[in-house]
Image (cartoon, rainbow, N blue to C red):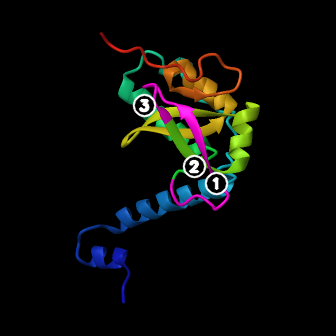
């Protein structure tokens, strides 16, 4: 039985050039994943979020840049089931409510020691939260101070959004 690419090509829906481009993109992505140190352990935050370049840009562009950057550097697992060792971690949300994430004990310890921070960000489905390295949390706070939810020693962390009158 032929694979999907061959079936689409034989039906005239895609060309051999389309297949080659798609395979090149797939190879590029898999190579990038292999060179990073895996989920939860970013290779480096040295490149950082280009805060100065993003200031003054439209919100949608900033949201997209922050979302992509957080997806690359986050320390917690974005999807899937937490391990049996995972524990609830409570934090203040911008609205004044208490939020909860279920994260691994090692990350809770890093949050308590100030090595990591908890930030809010605009995901494709609305406001979401991620555990990131402390430097990354500070970068996010440069753009949106209210998005910094937990970072030991930073006075901006946990601020509540003022209610509109």
Q: Which residues are magenta?
A: 79-98
Callout 2 secondary element: strand
Front label number (2 vs 3): 2
Q: Image check: 122 left or right of 36?
A: left
The reply to whether callout 2 and callout 1 are in contact (CB within 8 Å) is: yes
Q: For this rendering, which residue is in front, 87 or 68?
A: 87
- Is 12 placed above or below 84 here? below
* Image coords of residue 10 (percent x, y): 27, 78
User: What residue did someone put label 2 on?
Assistant: 102
Q: In this rendering, does residue 135 appear at all? A: yes
Callout 1 secondary element: loop
Callout 3 secondary element: helix
In magenta segment, residue 96: yes
Q: Earlier in the sequence, mark 2 or mark 1?
A: 1
In the picture, residue 29 is in which quadrant? bottom right
User: What residue did someone put label 3 on?
Assistant: 63
User: What residue did someone put label 1 on?
Assistant: 86
Residue at the spot 57% in from the left edge and 60% down from the top edge: 30
Q: Earlier in the sequence, mark 1 or mark 3?
A: 3
Q: For this rendering, which residue is in front, 12 or 72?
A: 72
Q: Image check: 43 left or right of 158?
A: right
């Amino acid at each position: 039985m032929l694979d999907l690419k061959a079936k689409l090509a034989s039906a005239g829906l895609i060309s051999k050039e389309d297949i080659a481009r798609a395979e090149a993109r797939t190879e590029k992505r898999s190579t990038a994943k292999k060179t990073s140190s895996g989920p939860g352990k970013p290779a480096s935050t040295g490149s950082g979020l280009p805060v100065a370049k993003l200031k003054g840009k439209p919100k949608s562009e900033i949201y997209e840049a922050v979302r992509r950057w957080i997806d690359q550097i986050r320390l917690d697992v974005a999807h899937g089931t937490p391990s049996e060792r995972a524990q609830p971690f409570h934090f203040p949300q911008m609205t004044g409510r208490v939020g909860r994430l279920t994260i691994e004990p090692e990350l809770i310890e890093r949050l308590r020691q100030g090595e990591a921070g908890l930030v809010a960000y605009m995901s494709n489905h609305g406001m979401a939260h991620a555990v990131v390295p402390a430097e990354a949390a500070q970068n996010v706070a440069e753009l949106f101070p209210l998005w910094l939810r937990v970072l030991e020693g930073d006075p901006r962390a946990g601020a509540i959004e003022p209610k509109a009158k």
